[in-house]
Every structure is written in C-alpha cells, then in structure tokens.
Image (spheres, rainbow, N blue to C red):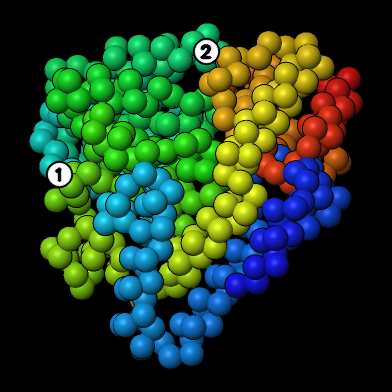
Amino acid sequence: MDNSVLRQVADCSFGHEMRQFWRLEPGMHFLNHGSFGATPRYVLAAQEAWRAQMEAQPVRFMTSELPLALRAAAARLGDFLGCAGERIAWVDNATTAINAVLRSFPWRAGDEIVVADHAYLAVRHTVDFVARRYGLRIKTARIPFPSLHEDAVLQAYCAAIGAQTRLAIVDHIFSPLALVAPLAKIAAHCKALGVAVLADGAHAPGAIPLQLDTLGALGVNWYVGNCHKWLLSPKGCAFLYATPEAAVELHPATISNFFGEGMTREFDWQGTRDCSAWLATTAALEFLQAIGVERYRDYLKNLANEAARCLCDGWRVALPAAENQFAAMATVPLPSSFSGEATPAGAARLHDRLWEAHRIEVPVLAFDDRLWVRISAQIYNELADYAALMRAIREIGG
C-alpha cells in the first residue's frame, strides 16, 4: 500500500478537506454515514489488491493463502477490539451474525427472549422467526426516549427480564435513537440471573472504545459489530465475537465443509465467496491509526453533539438525551410543524425532498407521533453541513 496516502491523511485537517480521501459525490451534504458507511479510497485500493491476488491463482489463494490471511486480519482486528483473534468470526453484516447466534441457541418451548422496542427491524424479524419456530415468548424492553439518564435504559431491561428469560438482546447503540446503552451494567445484571446476552453493536466499533474480553467477563456472551460503518471497512464486513463457552455450539447459518471443526473454521469458510472486504479491514485500521483513533472518536462525538445542539436551538426543540449518551450520531426531533407528517410515508417524503431539493442525505424517522432526523458525524463533515439541514427544514416547514 501507498504509505504516502497515510502521511497525507495524518497531515490533513478534519472537515471538508478530508473529502478528497473518499469517493463521495461533490456538492452534497452526506449526514448518513451510520447507515452503510463510506469507505476511504485507501481501503478500497487494499480491497482491490486482495481481489487481484485472488484472481492471479484462485485455487492457491482459496486453499492456501486465504485461511492464513483471514486469521491474520482477525488477529489485527482483535488487537483493536481487546480480544484474541480466535474469538473473532468474520460475517457479512450484523444481521448475519445475529441469525447465527439465535439459530444456534438451544431453545426450549416456553423460553423467553428479551428484545428492545427500538431494536433494529432485521433483528426483530429474526426474533419473531425463532419465536414461532421454537415456541418462545418475546418480552419487550421499552426504552424511554427522550431519555433523561442512562440508568433508565438499564431499568427497562431489568423490568423485561423474568424467571423464564434465557437470552437478552442488548443494543449497544440503538440504531434509530443513536443512544449509547450501559451495556456493561445490563450484562452484569443478566449474568447474575443466569441470562445469556447477545450484544448488537452494529454502530459501536470505531465510534466508541471496546474491550470485548472485558465485556465477555461481565456477561456478554456474543458481541456483533459492523466494520463498514465507523471502522471504515468495505461493505459486507462485520464480526461476531463469542466467549469460549458461547462458541462451543455456535454455527453459521450456512453450514459448509468444516462443520464441527470450531467457530473460526466454520465461519471462515462457508463456500466460495469474495473475502476481500474482511481482509481490507487491516487497511481500514491503518487509516484510522494514521489520523489518530482518539482524535477520530473525539471529533465524531464533539461534532455530533455540537450539531445536535445547534439544530435543537434553531428549531426550538429539546435535546432528547444527555450529550454523554450519544457517540458519532444523534437523533433530534423536528419542529412541531411536522407533527402532521409523523408516519413512515411522511418520513420518506421528507427524506426524498431533502435530497432532491437540497442535496442532503439524512435519515428521517417516524416514532412517538413525531418526525426525527438521525444525524451522523464523520471526519469529512463540518458544522456547515448541519447548518444546511437546519435551513432546509425551516424552508420546508414554513
């Protein structure tokens, strides 16, 4: 790889000057890194190099080079996440990993599973699927939002867990709310009750510090994280962490050649596929280290919070949670003049209008009888992007 790019990145100021290292369309305000991420050119070049190596001699690559390369990349990612590489299984996305855990778990009819009311839709669908198949009861942790303090989230899970609860799915960062949950406290409570914990950390890796072995000791049996968001990997790159005990009966949803040979062996090979996104995670970590991981996280959190404050002041609405409950995103209510459009269809119309008329890409959400926007912060953003959103909403709302 070209180290000169990393030197340029290290010397570049955060904000619009950083856009040169991405392939983003010019002339738009991209405030939605949280949905699918956006991969830097440096990381895409690394992915293409792996593809070239694969196509130069496909048999040698698949049988001899790929297994070693995947484990080397997992070890590098494990160093970043605070665990050994053998605890990391590669998956395409968080949904794939959650399917693997829920469909491997030894359910019994009448068991209860706890999931939050603001859980990601694909997670809820998977819960519904296994509940119907195995005769489970679904208990809902009702997350208060606006939220005055993080213990309210802990209390919501405590209220939902009962004597028959076998597993709780805990969102580390709630996708629609952008709220960071007190995962360690919730996991410790569940461990004391003998309840297994599956943590959905789709938005967490890169955005907040993680020490997965520490979380595992506290009671997190499985941790799922996407790399294509705040870790800046290519699309189709995620991981599944499992403690040694939780890995014993864990299998991918696709059973292939190495069934029964251990978690990493089974997940690394599920048939012929392009693994270049997983392998390019090492380049993504190089990119993050070049700009400085702590500097990166601080910029994301500070920009998200400053932007949220400015939007709330401009729209005369209240910030829905304390600033320490947000990381690289924040969810902000729209002015009351939009309350008549507080439906999924109304949210979609407003999203499309923001894009078509103002070239602003931002999620618009409908829940609790009002519309919200979930803003993301990335190092290619600056406050002017959110000021454009403030003006656009004022213009649309009259």
Which mark sits nearer the N-terminus, 2 or 1?
Answer: 2
Viewer-side residue, 177 vs 122: 177
Tell me the CA gap for discs 2 and 1: 35 Å
- Name above or below for residue 142 compared with residue 71: above
Q: Secondary structure at mark 2?
A: loop
Q: Label 1 amino acid?
A: Glu
Position of 319 with respect to 101 (left or right) is: right
Q: Which residue is mark 2?
A: 147
**Image vertical order of residue 75 relative to residue 300, above or below:** below
Q: Nearer the viewer, residue 29 or 381?
A: 381
The residue that label 1 is drawn on is 245
Q: Nearer the viewer's eye, disc 2 or disc 1?
A: 1
Q: Nearer the viewer, residue 224 or 212?
A: 212
Q: Is residue 369 visible?
A: no
Q: Position of residue 383 (x, y in %)?
A: 80, 32
Question: What is the quadrant of the C terminus in the image?
Answer: top right
**Lateral position of residue 306 relative to residue 63, left or right:** right
In the depicted structure, whether residue 181 falls above or below residue 200: above
Q: Is residue 177 left or right of residue 15?
A: left
Name the residue rendered at 57%, 70% in the picture. Answer: 46
In the image, what residue type sits under mark 2?
A: Ser
**C-beta proximity under 8 Å, tags 2 and 1:** no
The relative height of residue 136 versus residue 192 in the rendered view (above or below) is below
Quadrant in which the N terminus appears: bottom right
Classify 10 Å Cα crowding around label 1: few (below 14), some (14-19), many (20 and above): few
| Count of numbered circles on the image | 2
Q: Residue at horizontal 50%, vertical 35%?
A: 208
